[in-house]
Image: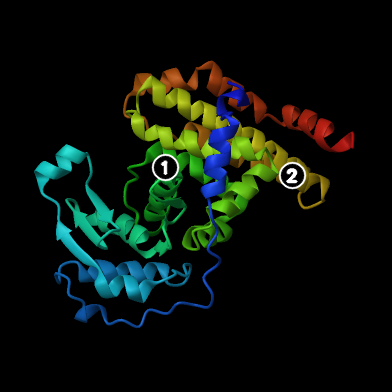
Amino acid sequence: MTLKNLEINKSKFDLLYGKITSIGPVLGKQEIIIDINKLNINKKYKPYIKKFIKKTQADFNFRNSNGTLKTLKINNLKKSKAKKYGATGYYNFYNNKIKLYIIDTIYHELFHAFTYHENNENYYCGFNQGNDCVDIANSINEGYTDLLTKRYFHIDIAYMIEANIVSKVELMLGKEKMRNMYTSNDLMGLIKFLSKHSSKQEAIGFITMMDKLDNYDYESKEAINLMNILSNYLVNVYLNFLAENYSLGIIDNADVNNELSRFKDKFVKYAFDDKELKKEYLRSSDYLDITSKLSNSNFREELRKKVLTK
């Protein structure tokens, strides 16, 4: 796969890039002062809310925790609707309501509720943002939300491919910076980071192509093909990222080897239920191309081209 798969036409790029806005960081530590016991919520959900706050309060600075909790509603999701929509829970930001079929899903949905924000005609939920005309970065947002849910609450990941892809971006940004971008709805900051090591068109193409993952079954060949295109893009971004850090003296040869090994490991950790499909992926030309790019000799060649010849 080549990066041409990420190209989008200029009119679509101009439309999407022009609609992405920044609303600034969350200023000051937002302490939660609302008494959870007094919330107008079924008492069976309150221990989960308390656990969510306890586990996240040190690392996350949510924009409007108290306002969210003040009007939050949580109800059961009927089995028939869960089956119809293929969801174990969801957050409806129009009325600040969480509906749950499986109760442990509450942690994922609370991340959505706590990162939701409205500003004029735009809405923001973690990295996802949009309005009546545009909706962008939903898959990145779901993937990162699931990654956080797994990390903090040990809940099985539902957005398997999205979480794996986003984890590669987090390796470059670092956990703290990625968390801060997520809570401050800084999609533009994420795009600027990616475009620093690729191009704006490719960065937008990467984000919009990720959104297409929702159209496929995770274990379909179409989803795996899409996953490989996205992964190939991130390999190139990562090589550029390492080359820059090496040229600036931030990392040395030993660091490079360690970083490449960590990054490479993420390409073999897709939890395919179908063992034959996993074998097919691991022997595919796309996977072999990715692992080749992550070899040390290849990196030195990339480094020579990008840094030593300047």
In the displayed structure, does residue 3 sit left or right of residue 275? right
**Residue 309 to residue 281: above or below:** below
CB under 8 Å between discs 2 and 1: no
Distance Cα–Cα, label 2 vs label 1: 34 Å
Q: Is residue 115 visible?
A: no
Residue shown at 84%/38% (left/top)? 307
Q: Which mark is residue 139?
A: 1
x%, y% of residue 268? Answer: 49, 32
Disc nearest the viewer among 2 and 1: 1
SS assignment at label 2:
helix
Number of marks: 2
Location of residue 165 with respect to 110 vertically, above or below:
above
**Image mark for residue 254:** 2
Crowd tier of the residue under label 2, counting other residues whose Cα lies within 10 Å: few below 14, some 14–19, many 20 or above: few
> Visible in this render: residue 192?
yes
Q: Quick one: quadrant of the N terminus?
A: top right
In which quadrant of the rendered view does residue 222 lie?
top left
Q: Nearer the viewer, residue 97 or 286?
A: 97
Q: Amino acid at mark 2?
A: Ala
Residue at the image position 41 percent from the left and 51 percent from the top: 131
Query: Position of 216 compared to 45: left or right?
Result: right
Q: Is disc 1 surrounded by few (<14), some (14 to 19) or many (20+) residues within 10 Å?
A: many
Q: Mark 1 is on which residue type?
A: Ser
Q: Earlier in the sequence, mark 2 or mark 1?
A: 1
